[in-house]
């Protein structure tokens, strides 16, 4: 099964960074990284009967972790996850 997740930065300030995430730009949830507490939180899930939010949320969370750990907190404006 092919996987495609798109993430688009909503905003970033000194306290947090927020991304939209989902299978396409019409079906998206929101995820944040709380910079002060070092925690990833879901703000709103994907609301769709066709796509399981948990599947996309977990992958978006992993990508945020990668941006933090491997990319030295370089929160890009847009990224995708493809496999």
Image (spheres, rainbow, N blue to C red):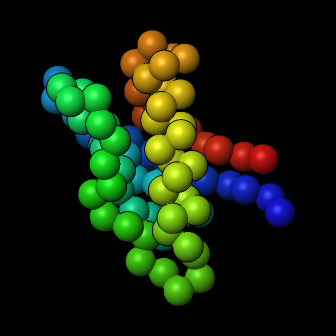
In the image, what residue occupies the spot 30% across and 36% down? 39
In terms of depth relative to the viewer, which is nearer, 52 or 81?
A: 52
List x then y, in percent, for residue 24: 56, 63
Whether residue 10 appears in this view of the structure is no
Residue 37 percent location from the top left of the image: 21, 30
Instruction: Report the residue at 40% width, 19% height from top.
Output: 73
Q: Quadrant of residue 40?
A: top left
Quadrant of the rendering where the N terminus is positioned = bottom right
As drawn, which residue projects farthest toward the right?
Answer: 1
Q: Nearer the viewer, residue 8 or 63?
A: 63
Image coordinates of residue 27 in percent, x first then y, are 48, 70
Residue 66, relative to residue 39: is it above or below?
above
Give the side of residue 8 with respect to residue 81, left or right: left
Q: Is residue 56 above or below residue 31?
A: below
- Give the residue at the far top of this rendering: 72
User: Position of 33 compared to 28: left or right?
Assistant: left
Quarter of the figure with residue 77: top left
Q: How many marks?
A: 0
* Residue 60 visible to the viewer: yes
Q: Is residue 18 above or below residue 49?
A: above
Q: Position of residue 5 (x, y in %)?
A: 60, 53
Residue, x 18% and y 26% (percent of image)?
36
Residue at horizontal 72%, vertical 46%? 82
């Amino acid at each position: 099964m092919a996987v495609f997740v798109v993430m688009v930065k909503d905003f970033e300030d000194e306290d947090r960074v927020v991304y939209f995430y989902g299978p396409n730009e019409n079906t998206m949830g929101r995820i944040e990284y709380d910079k002060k507490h070092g925690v990833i939180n879901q703000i709103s899930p994907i609301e769709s009967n066709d796509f399981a939010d948990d599947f996309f949320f977990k992958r978006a969370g992993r990508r945020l972790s990668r941006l933090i750990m491997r990319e030295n907190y370089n929160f890009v404006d847009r990224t995708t996850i493809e496999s």
